[in-house]
Image (spheres, rainbow, N blue to C red):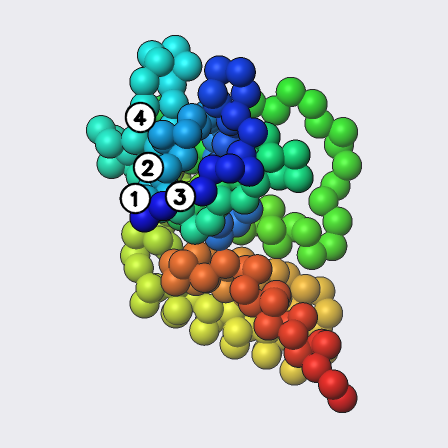
């Protein structure tokens, strides 16, 4: 396979920063560097390879840990000097065992996430629970019980929504709908189906000729 790097502007050290992003949730997992050889290896193997500036050598993500990253696509920015690499991670991205390397918040405006944006935030949190499986988390329990348990919960919450609506109980309907959305997002994660794909269906339907 011939990999074209003509449009890539490597810096004076022959490197380009690569922002690695979860293809399912959009979450940024890590930022690393590629040189021409690691870029070509990434494209050829379909898994991320980087260049270590400290060790001055190539490294294959997950070669020792098993936490590989299967590449969905790589996109070059308008200046040709940075990459976004969308991946499907097989385990945590960070050497600490965390799902993402970006865990220390250094500024928070306190502004609440508005409207449907909270679904994306929740989707990312569910993805973290799936990858890290903290022992005291309800989401961990659902993933470890498997798809049958998740489906049972989706069914139960659907029934609760119906009952609340039938009773004209708006307060109960609000809470039960929130539970249904949460369990549906867990199901989508278990099925490896990003919320973005569901939203795309809604958008496509919205723009269909009447």
Q: CA–CA distance between discs 1 and 2? A: 6 Å
Residue shown at 30% from the left, 31% from the top: 60
Question: Which residue is more in the foreground, 46 or 31?
Answer: 46
Mark 4 highlights which residue?
A: 59
- 112 on left or right of 4: right
Mark 2 highlights which residue?
A: 41
Tag in front: 2 or 3: 3
Residue shown at 64% from the left, 20% from the top: 106
Label 2: how many residues lie within 10 Å, few (<14), some (14-19) or many (20+)? some
Question: Which residue is more in the foreground, 34 or 164?
Answer: 34
Compared with residue 119, is residue 93 higher up or lower down, i.e. above or below?
A: above
Compared with residue 36, is residue 137 higher up or lower down, i.e. above or below?
A: below
Question: Which quadrant is the C terminus positioned in?
Answer: bottom right
Mark 3 highlights which residue?
A: 3
Name the N-terminal-most of marks 2 and 3. 3
Report the number of discs.
Answer: 4
Q: CA–CA distance between discs 2 and 3? A: 9 Å
């Amino acid at each position: 396979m011939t990999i074209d790097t003509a449009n890539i502007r490597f810096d004076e050290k022959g490197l380009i920063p690569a922002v690695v992003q979860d293809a399912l949730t959009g979450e940024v997992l890590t930022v690393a560097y590629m040189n021409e050889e690691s870029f070509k290896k990434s494209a050829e193997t379909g898994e991320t390879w980087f260049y270590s500036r400290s060790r001055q050598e190539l490294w294959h993500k997950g070669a020792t840990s098993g936490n590989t990253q299967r590449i969905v696509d790589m996109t070059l920015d308008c200046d040709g000097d940075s990459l976004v690499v969308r991946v499907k991670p097989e385990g945590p991205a960070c050497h600490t065992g965390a799902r993402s390397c970006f865990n220390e918040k250094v500024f928070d405006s306190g502004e609440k996430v508005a409207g449907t944006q909270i679904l994306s935030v929740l989707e990312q949190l569910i993805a973290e629970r799936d990858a890290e499986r903290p022992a005291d988390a309800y989401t961990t329990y659902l993933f470890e019980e498997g798809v049958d348990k998740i489906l049972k919960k989706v069914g139960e919450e659907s029934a609760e929504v119906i009952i609340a609506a039938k009773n004209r109980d708006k307060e109960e309907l609000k809470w039960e709908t929130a539970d249904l959305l949460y369990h549906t997002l867990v199901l989508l994660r278990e099925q490896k189906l990003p919320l973005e794909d569901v939203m795309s269906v809604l958008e496509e339907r919205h723009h269909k000729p009447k």
